Amino acid sequence: MIVRIMGEGQVRLADSHLADLNTLDDELLAEMEKGDGPGFRRTLQALLTRVRDLGDPLPDDSLEPSELILPSPDATLEEVRELLSDDGLIPG
């Protein structure tokens, strides 16, 4: 699957990593519901780092359809709230 990190680019990620990413996504949603800004920031960074570590970056001139779009590393809690549906960032 192709994952886009807003403001950074795209990575190709094996579907087998979804369960691992869902755990971080669930934590991120819980922190957002509580309004835990520091926890949100920490978990967002962990999620993005995990995607970067597990994925293979696509060339900058490549534009593939993204199956997942993640917020930029500097996104605020409010900005991410606007991006989310009830399913979170990573579809289960």
Image: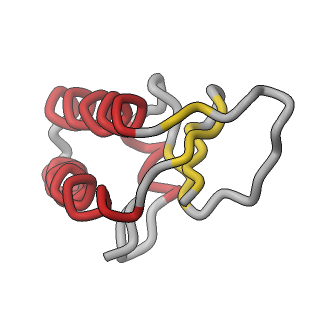
Residue 11 falls in which quadrant of the image?
Answer: top right
Rendered image quadrant of residue 90: bottom left
User: Measuring 39% from the left and 72% from the top, which residue is drawn there?
Assistant: 91
- Examine the rendered structure and indicate whether residue 66 appears above or below residue 28: below
Q: Position of residue 92 (x, y in %)?
A: 31, 76
User: Residue 36 placed where, x, y %?
Assistant: 15, 39
According to the image, what is the colour scheme of the structure?
A: secondary structure
**Residue at 20% over, 54% down:** 20
Q: Is residue 55 left or right of residue 88?
A: right
Q: Position of residue 13 (x, y in %)?
A: 46, 50
Residue 21 or 39: which is nearer the viewer?
Answer: 21
Q: Quick check: 77 above or below 68?
A: above
Q: Nearer the viewer, residue 87 or 16?
A: 16
Relative to 24, is 62 on the left or the right?
Answer: right
- Residue placed at 45% from the left, 26% from the top? 73
Count of picture labels: 0
Q: Residue 86: horizontal and vertical position, in percent?
A: 36, 76
Is 19 on the left-hand or right-hand side of 56?
Answer: left
| Quadrant holding the N terminus | bottom right
- The extreme right residue here reads 61
**Residue drawn where x is 16% and y is 57% of the image:** 23
Q: Is residue 13 left or right of residue 37?
A: right
